[in-house]
């Protein structure tokens, strides 16, 4: 059941990140879920590197959205 919850939260985070990031977003639902999940991973490790989170502590919802936005910006820079 935790995998289903992870996918749903990844979808919500990915959708919010795509909404907050200006410009076209030509990707499907699977890519949106992956962007949300990878954004949470980026936020977790980035927050631990900046001493915002303790080791083993996951990023919060807003941190995950910020991580997903950062990932979308990086993907757009690479695509150009």
Image (spheres, rainbow, N blue to C red):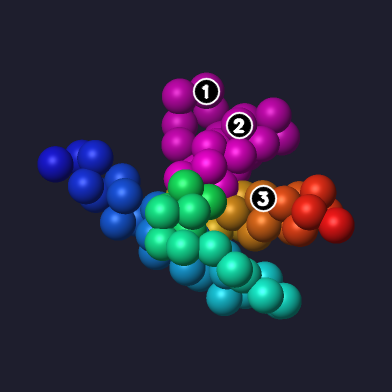
Q: Is residue 32 left or right of residue 71?
A: left
- Is residue 29 within the magenta segment? no
Question: In the image, which residues are magenta?
Answer: 37-59
In terms of image quadrants, where is residue 26?
bottom right
| Image point (31%, 50%), residue name | 7
> What label does residue 55 carry, if any?
1
Name the residue nearer the viewer: 14 or 57: 14
Name the residue nearer the viewer: 75 or 5: 75
- Is residue 49 within the magenta segment? yes
Badge 1 element: loop
Decide: is 68 above or below 22: above
Q: Position of residue 40 (x, y in %)?
A: 51, 44
> What label does residue 71 carry, if any?
3
Q: Residues within 10 Å of mark 3 (few under 14, many from 20)?
A: many
Q: Real-space Cα distance between discs 2 and 3?
A: 13 Å
Are circles 2 and 1 on residues that touch, CB within 8 Å? no
């Amino acid at each position: 059941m935790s995998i289903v919850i992870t996918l749903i939260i990844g979808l919500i985070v990915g959708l919010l990140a795509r909404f907050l990031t200006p410009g076209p977003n030509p990707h499907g639902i699977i890519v949106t879920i992956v962007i949300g999940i990878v954004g949470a991973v980026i936020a977790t490790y980035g927050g631990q590197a900046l001493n915002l989170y303790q080791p083993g502590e996951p990023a919060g919802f807003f941190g995950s959205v910020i991580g997903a936005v950062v990932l979308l910006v990086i993907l757009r820079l690479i695509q150009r």
